[in-house]
Image (cartoon, helix red, strand yellow):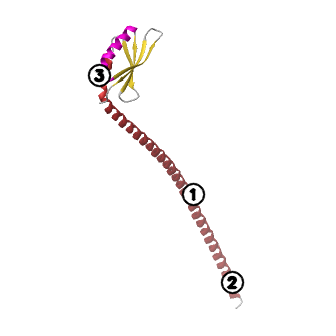
């Protein structure tokens, strides 16, 4: 009987080993499933984070390009502003320097006889010359203009030069005069 006891014990031991192997297999399968699940969750998380970072990077690139465009626009506007400011300063200085000329221009308009129309007044080659283009209706109006101009030389201007006279087809006369005065 001594031999029979260990046989019974071996059968029970095989069963215990078999149960332990099954438990071990179940644990391995459970561990594998849990590990695979964790791996899949981490993989999805990495993909989501990567997608978010890529989209934020694209947004940042877009913001940078927009900001660069705004900065270049501001620089362009600033350059234009400086240019306009400098031109306004020049114009203001020019106007301030020409204020004494306004009475001379008024005098030119006032001395023109009837039948003579001032078409244009501009500065001549130097600052003390006003170039005036007039239109006279007839030769008699030209005569009146020359009389008035010769009187103005004695009182208001240092020289008056008739630089051009042309008769148009319609019978009117175009004259270009240069009024020279002492600046100041």
SS for dot 2? helix
Whole-angstrom CA distance, mark 2 to mark 3, is 145 Å
Which residue position is annotated with label 2? Answer: 10
Q: Which residues are magenta?
A: 138-158
Which residue position is annotated with label 3? Answer: 156
The residue drawn where x is 36% and y is 10% is: 143
Q: Quick one: label 1, few (<14), some, or many (20+) residues within 10 Å?
A: few
Q: Is residue 146 magenta?
A: yes
SS for dot 3? loop
Q: Which residue is at the far bottom?
A: 2
- Viewer-proximal residue, 85 or 99? 99
SS for dot 1? helix
Which residue position is annotated with label 1? Answer: 47
Which-is-in-front pick, marks 2 and 1? Answer: 1
Which-is-in-front pick, marks 2 and 3? Answer: 3
The answer to whether residue 16 is above or below residue 142 is: below
- Viewer-proximal residue, 24 or 49? 49
Which of pointers 2 and 3 lies earlier in the amino acid sequence?
A: 2
């Amino acid at each position: 009987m001594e031999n029979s006891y260990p046989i019974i014990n071996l059968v029970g031991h095989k069963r215990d080993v078999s149960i332990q192997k099954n438990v071990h297999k179940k644990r391995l399968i459970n561990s594998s499933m849990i590990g695979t699940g964790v791996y899949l969750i981490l993989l999805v998380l990495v993909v989501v984070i990567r997608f978010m970072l890529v989209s934020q990077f694209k947004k940042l690139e877009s913001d940078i390009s927009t900001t660069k465009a705004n900065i270049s626009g501001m620089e362009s506007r600033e350059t234009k502003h400086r240019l306009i400011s400098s031109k306004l300063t020049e114009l203001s200085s020019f106007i301030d320097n020409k204020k004494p000329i306004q009475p001379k221009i008024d005098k030119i308009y006032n001395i023109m006889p009837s039948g003579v129309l001032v078409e244009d007044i501009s500065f001549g080659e130097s600052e003390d010359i006003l170039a005036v283009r007039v239109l006279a209706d007839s030769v008699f109006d030209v005569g009146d203009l020359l009389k008035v101009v010769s009187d103005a030389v004695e009182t208001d201007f240092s020289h008056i030069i008739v630089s051009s006279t042309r008769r148009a087809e319609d019978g009117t006369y175009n004259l270009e005069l240069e009024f020279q005065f002492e600046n100041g």
